[in-house]
Image: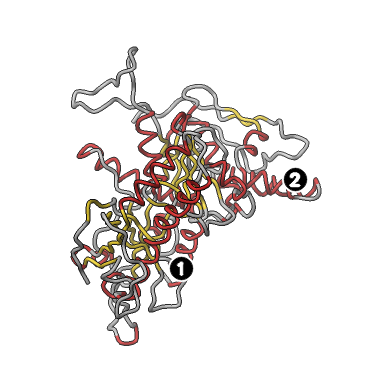
Amino acid sequence: MEKNFEGKIGESDILEIPVKDPRTTSTIANYINVILDFTNFNPPYWLRSDNDTGEGHWWYYFKQNNTVHVLIAEDVRKGFVNLMTRKNNNENLTREEIGSLETYAAILNTTPHIGAQQATDTYPEYILGKITNPENTKKTNRTKKKAGEIDEVPTVIPTITNKKYQNAMTLNTDSTAYLQPFSSVDNLVYENGQILFKGLPASAATLKEYFTSTEIDNFDLPLLRLFYGIILNRFAKTWKEDQSIEGYVTIYYPDLAKKLGKSSNISKSDVQSCIDSIMQFQTIMGIIDNGSKGTEIIPVLVYMGNDTEKNTISFASPYMVKVIKNVFNASIRKNKTGLPQLKKDGNPQLLPAYSYMIKSSIGKERNKKAVEIVFVIVSLIEQSGNHCPHIKAKTIIDRIPILKNSIDNCKTTSDKNKMLKRAFSKAWDILPKHTKLKETYQDIKLPLSTDVPSMSSLDIVYKFPHNGKTKS
């Protein structure tokens, strides 16, 4: 499985490459660890081993840490970096240089994927683990104790109230950060912290034709925000220790179902439904504007697999990790000279950045438009301080793309009014049920389920007066 190559002069960080399990017909991708070994020679990609693969010639499998190593010539890496740097600096490349850049990009983009899949096809049980045949296996109780190391599912969903990043977990196009659905991600690859499109580094401008606003109401945004809360909780624990944050998460599905207010009797269809939701998230990218450093396009959620014996589901989120770090940095109190204000323990003082008013149980509600109204209202109330929160119905609609699109797609005014009634009536019904507003704000007044707008009254203003927060 292993081979020490002479001529290795460096290696990449660990890449997560999607592969298919050759033992099943499932189309679900599994992600495995791949390292690029940079060499002072051109790897012989044309040579084949006895297994009719490139094993031992340009890739090898390191069993001790379950990692596939793929050989790449250092000249290819350097050539790609040099030409891409010049291109990004708006230098004009010659036709020959453009051809070289495309060749380098193709090698860097496709070779790791080919090597990873060949290795998985050769050593599936080492790389992906054994598949248990239920018919020949004694049935065991899939308890939380047997699930191993898992992440806790919070009872509330954090809502970003930092105004700079308040849309980071919404579909609202924003100048700082937001979620952008794609019509297709077939030609997109995320490697080394960068999105590659057809082998070349991509920007929001080059990918704009793949942006879509259709079928966006299929996305389970409350579930996505709950996953954000899981990573945020981990961040709170590890940041003080070593300034790190781990974006790989494993959850015990019965815990998730319980927090979402669902039945504790878990069936295969329940787990598959959750997996399907996660798979849908893989067509969403996070867009982050870094100012003079350009715009980043980052995967929002990457499905890492599930363990049917342990009842666990695993995923990673490069985008959420980035947003959590950015929100943290944006929340640090600064003095007049712009330096961070520190507490006695040396940690920075932080401005409020999140609301913890919305219960995770809101995730079981099927009317997602009503749920999004709840998120808008809670953010409004939490950001208003001691002032009386107020907002027009039209503003609420404009902040919720799935609601606005649905209204725009209605053919008649009557249908639009019905859509408004279903969304707002349900929102006012579940607002006190799935939030802590009543317990937190003294004498707060919330709309009745009959307080719904029509197309002729979109300027109606909803007010949420209260007598301040209760003293804890």
Residue located at (30% from left, 68% from top):
310
Q: Position of residue 99 (x, y in %)?
A: 49, 51
Residue 308 sits in quarter:
bottom left
Closer-to-camera residue (114/26): 114
**Furthest-bottom residue in this view:** 136
Q: Secondary structure at mark 1?
A: helix
Closer-to-camera residue (59/57): 57
Q: Which label sits on residue 301?
A: none
In this rendering, would 136 be left or right of 303? left
**Badge 1: few (under 14), some or many (20 or more) residues near its Cα, within 10 Å?**
few
Question: Would you place residue 119 above or below residue 43 in this image?
Answer: below
The quadrant in which the C terminus is found is top left
Number of numbered discs overlaid on the protein picture: 2
Residue named by callout 2: 417
The quadrant in which the N terminus is found is bottom left
Q: Amino acid at mark 1?
A: Gln
In this rendering, would 56 be left or right of 228? left
Residue located at (51% from left, 55% from top):
198
Question: Would you place residue 106 above or below residue 91 in this image?
Answer: below
Between marks 1 and 2 in the image, the one whose residue lies nearer the viewer? 1
Q: Position of residue 282 (x, y in %)?
A: 48, 56
Q: Secondary structure at mark 2?
A: helix
Q: Is residue 25 visible?
A: yes
Question: Would you place residue 49 above or below residue 313 in this image?
Answer: below
Residue named by callout 1: 272
Q: Position of residue 178 (x, y in %)?
A: 51, 40
Q: Amino acid at mark 2?
A: Asn
